Amino acid sequence: MISESGLWDMLQFLDGLFPSGAFAHSFGLETLVQEGWVGGEAEALEWLTEIVEDSWAWSDGMAATQVWRAGDRRNALEHAASVDAFLSASRASRESRDGSLMIGRRILQEAARLLADPELVGYQSLVQEHPSLGNAAVVVSLIGLVRGWGETATLAGYAYFSVSGMVQALVRLIPLGQSSGQRLLHTLRPVAMAALDTVHEKSLEDMGSRMPLWEVAAMRHLVLYSRLFRS
């Protein structure tokens, strides 16, 4: 069971007020809204369900679970780096790859500074040496591993962080009301957890989005006429 200090750590690092920069990225949602694919709560739920099940689960969700498969704690950093590099290589769009790396590296930077954990500091050094390392999914899971959050709590926390970010983007883009956003979050919880269960025993070779339209939407974001979010 996660300790009181561990729970506090997790809530702090995954809170919307934490300076991860996640609020500045829509990962293709802005494209879907501008092009008329998503225009209300019902469409938002339909699209987010598909994104979670067919894209997020098989990329970020799978990477988050794979960090916990090192076997020997002494190999945790090396194993995390392998998962990290595989996740970067599996992304079809530069926009989704760069966005994930920006967010993950910012979380790692703050975590290493605040916690002064030697393993996190060590992974930060690896990230600085290798441009393909630092994805948010891997960073959050690694922090949970070295800080003793436990696999179940860490994965649930990361799922909330990811889905909440998408919902908050749509609240600003459509716009949705705050109550609608909370309904979406509540409805998507079992969807996200079931999606994690689906990929739990899969291997790295299975990693990769199964939703090409979502990747194309991320690619097209750069050339939108106007943008609220960064590419």
Image (cartoon, grey):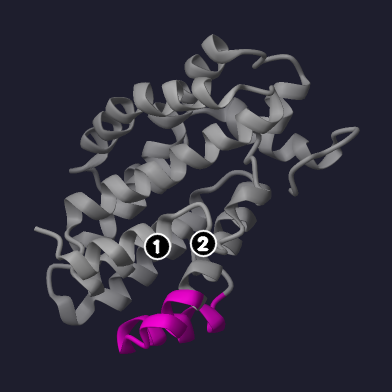
The quadrant where residue 15 appears? bottom left
Q: Is 177 left or right of 65, judged from the image as shown? A: right
Residue 51, above or below 141: above
Q: Tell which of 21 and 130 is nearer to you.
A: 21
The span shown in magenta is 110-130
Which residue is disc 2 drawn over?
18
Counting from the top left corner in percent of width and height, residue 195 is at: 30, 32
Whether 134 is drawn above or below 30: the answer is below
Disc 2 marks a residue whose amino acid type is Phe
Q: Position of residue 39 (x, y in %)?
A: 67, 14
Q: Amino acid at mark 1?
A: Gln
Q: Is residue 28 left or right of residue 53?
A: right
Q: Residues within 10 Å of mark 2 (few under 14, many from 20)?
A: some
**Disc count in the image?**
2
Residue 12 - label: 1
Cα separation, mark 2 vs mark 1, equals 7 Å
